Each structure stands twice: as structure tokens, then as C-alpha cells.
Image (spheres, helix red, strand yellow):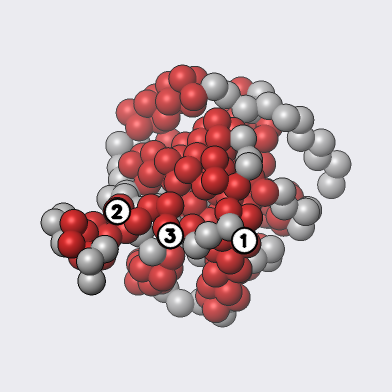
Amino acid sequence: MNMKLTEKYPSKEEAHNILDWASKQNPEPWVEHCKNAAHAAETIAQACGLAPEKAYVSGLLHDIGYYSYRNGKGPTCHIYAGYKLMMKKGYFEVAKICLTHSFPYQDINAYGGSDMTCTDNELAFISDVIATDYDDYDKLIQLCDCIASAQGMCTMEKRLIDVVMRHGFGNMTIKRWKAYLGLKDYFSQLCGKNIYTLFYDELAIDIFGDHAHTNSKNV
């Protein structure tokens, strides 16, 4: 594969405009998930020395391919639909992340969703992309995809179990889990602290409820 991606991504304003348009095409919980993933990506990027705006817009648009879905069905998988849309707009960096965010374990058979309705040529192309070296933004959005739900920030373990409950346990589920846990360790090392501490109050609310977090630091 000869895929040369340049350093190009939209501004925050343009990224929100794209997401607003997409949400009108398919107004489902994926939109809030993207906003929460963007928040997570920006926060972690600030803590570990990456570019916060690039991280934010990458998180905001990583699932943008869901714009093409109606009643849970689309012409191709959301990762490839997102790639095509971002390439059309010239946002090459985000286009790559639309493909890589679903593959912390770099194997096409490790896809964790249920919409892999791609053609053979599309599958071959995705396989080539995910076989390349991931940079820290690929890895960051993979991580944030796994700690941001539509409701807000959550522990990785909760999100992983939720995905399995919705899509089933596959032959590569454990490998995917290990890859995600490795990402948490990687960014915790870059930040110099457990990344969960960056979202202490948000995670406390998710775990203990709306008011319990106010007393949790005294327990």
C-alpha cells in the first residue's frame, strides 16, 4: 500500500460543524460518545505533551462514518465511511484515525463492532492501513474510544464489557482487551500519573452516582 498522509485536520469549529451535520443524518448516541472522546483526548494530550486541538478534533470525528447509517444499516462499515468522508474533505490525519481507532490489536479479524459490511477491496485496504506503525494520536483515540461512553467518562473495564454485551465475545476479544489495557499503561507513563486521575470527579460520578463523589476523597 502507498498511503502518504499529510498533517492536516480541521479546526475545532469546522469539526463541530461536520459533527452537527452528521448528527442530523443519524441522531443516535454515537454523537455524544464522540464529544466525550474528544474531551478525553484533549485532556490527556494536555497532560502528556501532545497537541490538544489535534487530539480533540480527532476524537470528535473518529466515528463520523456513522452519519451514513439508517436504522442501524449503512452502505459500508462506519470506519470506512468515515475515512472516505474525511479524505473527501482533505483531512488526511483524521481519515487515518477513522480506520485505526477500532484496531488497537492490529488484525482485521479483531474488529469489535457488528457493522463490518465492507467489500473485499475495502477490507484489504483497511488491513493495509492498520498494519502500519501507529503514532501517538492513533493510540490516543483508541484509548479515548474505550474510556468515553455516550453518558460520559467511564472506566475501561466497564466499556469493554459493554461492547461485549452488545456485540458478543469473539476469538480475539482477550487480545483486544490486552491491547486496550496496554494503551492505558502507555499514556499513564507519558502523563506521569494514572490517566484516571485526570477524570477523578467524572469517574466518581459514573461509579458512585451524582452525589457520592463529593465524599469519595474522604473514604
Which residue is under mark 2?
201
Q: CA distance from mark 3 to mark 2?
A: 10 Å
Q: CA distance from mark 2 to mark 1?
A: 21 Å
Instruction: State left or right for residue 157 relative to residue 92.
Output: left
Which residue is under mark 1?
189
- Neighbor class of circle 1 (other Cα within 10 Å; few <14, some 14-19, many 20+) is few
Q: Quadrant of residue 104?
A: bottom right
Q: Is residue 200 above or below residue 49?
A: below
Who's the residue at 62% across and 61% down the image?
Answer: 189
Name the residue type under label 1.
Gln
Residue 85 placed where, x, y %?
57, 31
Name the residue type under label 3.
Tyr
Residue 196: image tag: 3
Name the residue type under label 2.
Asp
Instruction: State left or right for residue 38 relative to residue 134.
Output: left
Q: Quadrant of residue 87?
A: top right
Who's the residue at 54% across and 40% down the image?
Answer: 46
Q: Is residue 25 above or below residue 120?
A: above
